[in-house]
Amino acid sequence: MPEIAIFLQEFHLTQPAFLSRGATVVSGLVAAALLSACAHHRPASQPYPPGGYQGGYSSHAPATAEYGRVTHIQWLQGHHQGQTTGAGAVLGAVVGGLIGNQVGKGSGRAAATAVGVVGGAVAGNAIEERNQAAQGSYRITIQLDRGGRRAYDVPSVGDLRVGDPVRMVNGQISRY
C-alpha cells in the first residue's frame, strides 16, 4: 500500500478519486455477478429414465408396476406464485447498497445507500417472484388398466403424449 501512496503523491492524484473509480468497477462486476444469479435458467427437457436396472441395493420392498394410458396432460401455470425464498431480496439489497454507496458524500452517501438497499431489495424480490411464476409443472392424468385414475405433478412431460401406454414404478412414469 505505501507504493500506491507514493505514486499518488508524485502525480498529484487524490486517493478518493483513485479508489472510487476502482470501487465503481468492482461494484459493477459484483452487481453483474449477483444479478446473473437471479436469472432463471430453465433446464432442457429430459425424457423419463427407462425402467431398467439403476444399480445398488434398495432397503425398500420391491415396487410393483402399474400400467395405464395417459388421458390428460395439463400445464399448471405459476404453481409457486407469490412464494419467494428471500434470496432475490437479499441479493438485490446488497447490489443496491453497493451502487447507492457510490453516490454522494457524507450523509448524502448514507441516504443513497439506504435508498439503494431498499430499492434493490424490492427489485430483487420482484425478479425472483417473476422467475418463480414463470416456472410451472404439468399434471399428467393416467387411466389405470386395472381401473381407477392417478394424477402426477411433474416438472416436464418428456416425450409423453395423450394416449401413450405407460408404466409407473415408484412415481416414475415411462412409456412402454
Image: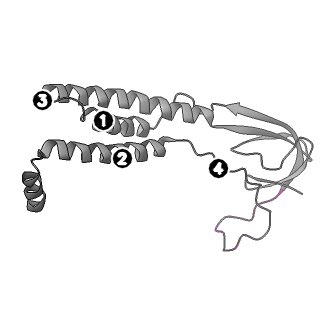
Image quadrant holding the N terminus, namely bottom left
* 1 vs 4, front mark: 1
Which mark sits nearer the N-terminus, 2 or 3?
2
| Mark nearer the N terminus (1 vs 4) | 4
- The residue at which mark 2 appears reads as 30
Q: Which residues are magenta?
A: 54-65
Q: Earlier in the sequence, mark 4 or mark 2?
A: 2
Judged by depth in the image, the label closer to the viewer, 4 or 2, is 2
- Indicate which disc, 4 or 3, sits on the residue closer to the N terminus: 4
Q: Which mark is residue 106?
A: 3
Crowdedness of circle 4 by 10 Å Cα count: few (<14), some, many (20+)? Answer: few
Which residue is labeled 1 in the image?
99
Of labels 2 and 1, earlier in sequence is 2
Q: Residue at x 58, y 46 (%)?
A: 41
Mark 1–mark 3 distance (CA, rounded to whole Å):
15 Å
Amino acid under label 3? Gly
Label 1 residue SS: helix
Tell me the tag on residue 43: 4
In the rendered view, does 89 fall on the left or right side of 65? left
Q: Secondary structure at mark 3?
A: loop
User: Is residue 34 left or right of 105 when viewed as pictured?
Assistant: right
Q: Residue at x 9, y 47 (%)?
A: 12
